[in-house]
Image (tube, rainbow, N blue to C red):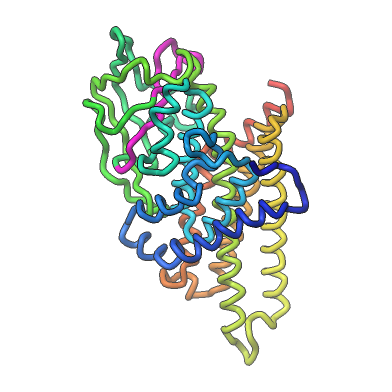
Amino acid sequence: MSQSTPFFALSEDHVAIRDMARAFASEQIAPHALEWDEKKHFPVAQMRAAAALGMGGVYIREDVGGSGLTRLDSALIFEAMSTGCPAVAAFISIHNMASWMIDTWGSESQRMQWLPKLTTMEWMASYCLTEAGAGSDAAALSTKAVRDGDDYVLNGAKQFISGAGDTDVYVVMVRTGAEGAKGVSTLVIPKDTPGLSFGANERKMGWNAQPTRQVIFDNARVPVANRLGNEGDGFKIAMAGLDGGRLNIAACSLGGAQAALEKSLAYMNERKAFGKRLDEFQALQFRIADMAIELEAARSFLWRAAAALDRKEPEATKLCAMAKRFVTDACFNVANEALQLHGGYGYLHEYGVEKIVRDLRVHQILEGTNEIMRVIVARALVGR
């Protein structure tokens, strides 16, 4: 198992993991990313190929086929994968988050029921928390699960669910008790459950290589045996999943922004204006220097938060929120600057920069908006 040591120097294992993921992204994802974006294609075959390399269960225990790696390893993997396509890497990260919730909170029988096929991505998982009327205020969710013998009967709908309709397993937060966080429970629900249906694939600004739909429950019956933990544990489970999810999505921002910087350097080396290459103008050199500095600062912060989560430090949740806010904001700005450096060509689909800008924009919203990240940090600081 890889160790979460290090700041300032990666071990040989870390470098090998990162290089493996970067090579996969370059060979299997990057050449197709623009076409997948344009055609809204969900690349199941390539994601299963990534799972064959251990990316379907990065920090899932090895007895069910997981890789048993650390959150720092995960940050390296998802950054590297996102250089190929942030939307594809982000879906794999969401799949990992949902699978981790089963691995961490499930009974042994539940782990054995679900995880062997999830770690290979023969089955794919979606995380279902958000509702039309419960986004940032997630504890206000209203999807109800009423106990009826050995089943729950579910009614309600989840909104903005990544992979919905194409995935096989849904880790769903439902209301089994009173209002507020303490009335929430978590159920693992298979796609073929009677009464479970899906909305239309949403038309989105970015993330077109993964579908986004409503998940709708109309008197859907789910066995009580599919509940993770006890009744009332669901909000705690959901929030624990999001600590790691925020690191993953920050890593996906880093990979996308790194790719945008690399595209800018290549373009500036080829493009001429006023008799000189663009990379010979000091004003433009300073801009790419600032972009690289922002990425390095973001990367260091992400690694710090990931190592804190690995060590279960008391401040881990705060650091994950800090890192998510800082990294996703900084990386969107870098990608946007890369578009500007390309001039009119940056606005064209074929150069790939505008796609990165579109894909990274949503990272400032999902896994908790960056405004909510500030709320988490502020509460930790003032002791509320």
Measuring from the top left, give residue 37's x and y in whole percent. 37, 60
Residue range in magenta is 166-187
Residue 210 lies left or right of residue 310; in this view the side is: left
Q: Is residue 255 above or below residue 162?
A: below
Residue 355 lies left or right of residue 17; in this view the side is: left
Residue at coordinates 30% horizontally, 20% vertically from top-left? 222
Q: Residue furthest bottom?
A: 275
Q: Is residue 52 above or below residue 29?
A: above
Q: Residue furthest left?
A: 194
Residue 248 among those drawn in magenta: no
Residue at coordinates 40% horizontally, 14% vertically from top-left? 176
Q: Is residue 68 above or below residue 227?
A: below
Q: How many marks?
A: 0
Q: Quadrant of the C terminus?
A: top right
Tell me if I can see residue 125 in this picture. Answer: no
Q: Residue furthest right?
A: 8
Tell me if I can see residue 317 in this picture. Answer: yes
Measuring from the top left, give residue 109's x and y in whole percent. 42, 22
Residue 25 lies left or right of residue 202; in this view the side is: right
Closer-to-camera residue (113/335): 113
Q: Quadrant of the N terminus?
A: top right
The quarter of the picture where residue 23 lies is bottom right
